[in-house]
Image: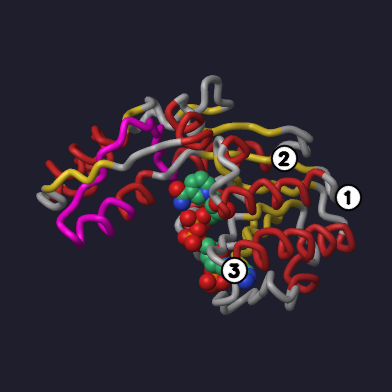
Amino acid sequence: MRVAVIGGTGMLGVPLCEVLAARGHEVRALSRSSTTFPVDLSTGAGLRDALAGCDAVVDASNGRGRAAQTVLVDGSRRLVEAEAAEGIRHHVVVSIVGCDQVPSFSYYRAKVAQEGTVRTGEVPWTVVRATQFHGFVDMVFGAVAKAGLRLSSGVALAPVDVREVCDALAEVTEGPGEGRTLDIAGPDAVPIRDLARAWHRATGRGRVPLRVPTWGPTGRALREGALVSAAPYARGKVDFGSWLERTYA
Ligand SMILES: NC(=O)c1ccc[n+]([C@@H]2O[C@H](COP(=O)([O-])OP(=O)(O)OC[C@H]3O[C@@H](n4cnc5c(N)ncnc54)[C@H](OP(=O)(O)O)[C@@H]3O)[C@@H](O)[C@H]2O)c1
């Protein structure tokens, strides 16, 4: 198959392109900084040319702040329209487990809206929701540790190895549009405070616990496990501890 990966230069996109290529597919990595297929979802520039002749598209792009609307939501609409014009047979969008449970997070509202543009578009689709990648959790803990702090919260995450997400994503992409939402999660649900302690032991950084209060409907949803998946389509095997050993050994 010829597969276009939008956001092919990102934390997910780079290993996804590698995994797809290793499975024998012809892969096009699309993003603003791509030298071969530059595209800009916020304007639609380059999309039609980059998608010509492709069979499937995985949307692994990202945008934060104002770009959440222009890239994830409006960009997704532009992307699906270009795909319909180019006869793409399967659109896979990468989303986040529980994004519909936490509407007070504006980024999560954008992810829900992005999913909506895909579900109502003309191209056969599958929504694949992943839990937080180990590398993302590491990045957040690292940012907090710059102030000498480490997060302390009972809210559970189920961090997942990005390679295992890519394996499951590739398998989904090879199939037809499922017209449904599939979850990919890490092996266990672990309170953030325990993940942060393990990170502190591995890195020696972030000595002082910072209690993160949760309140209201958002707090309840998070405490009740909104960000973990009870029955995922695919469950990774690599836990955060093993990932830390591999990364910081
Ligand atoms: N990180 C996690 O833990 C996690 C967990 C679950 C789901 N997800 C989802 O997975 C997706 C990818 O996340 P990520 O962490 O891999 O993101 P990332 O590392 O920030 O990568 C974002 C990608 O999007 C591209 N991009 C940004 N603006 C663009 C634009 N205007 N036009 C075209 N491409 C653009 C970037 O390349 P250029 O800058 O070159 O354009 C880059 O390749 C997101 O939808 C996210 O919600 C992430």
Q: Earlier in the sequence, mark 2 or mark 3?
A: 3
Circle 2 sits on which residue? 126
Quadrant position of residue 153: top left
- Residue type highlighted by circle 1: Glu
Circle 1 sits on which residue? 122
Residue 106 location, x and y as percent?
57, 54
On the question of residue 110 being in view, the answer is yes
**Point 69% across, 69% down: residue:** 41
- Residue 182 vs 21, above or below: the answer is above
Residue 92 location, x and y as percent?
69, 46
**Point 75% across, 71% down: residue:** 47
> Label 1: few (<14), some or many (≥20) within 10 Å?
some
Decide: marks 1, 2 in contact (CB < 8 A)?
A: no
Q: Is residue 134 left or right of residue 22?
A: left
> Please, which residue is most extreme toward the top here?
231
Q: Is residue 145 left or right of residue 5?
A: left
> CA–CA distance between discs 3 and 1?
26 Å
Q: For the residue labelled by badge 1, is the local secondary structure a helix, a strand or a loop?
A: loop
**Point 46% across, 27% down: residue:** 225
> CA–CA distance between discs 1 and 2?
12 Å
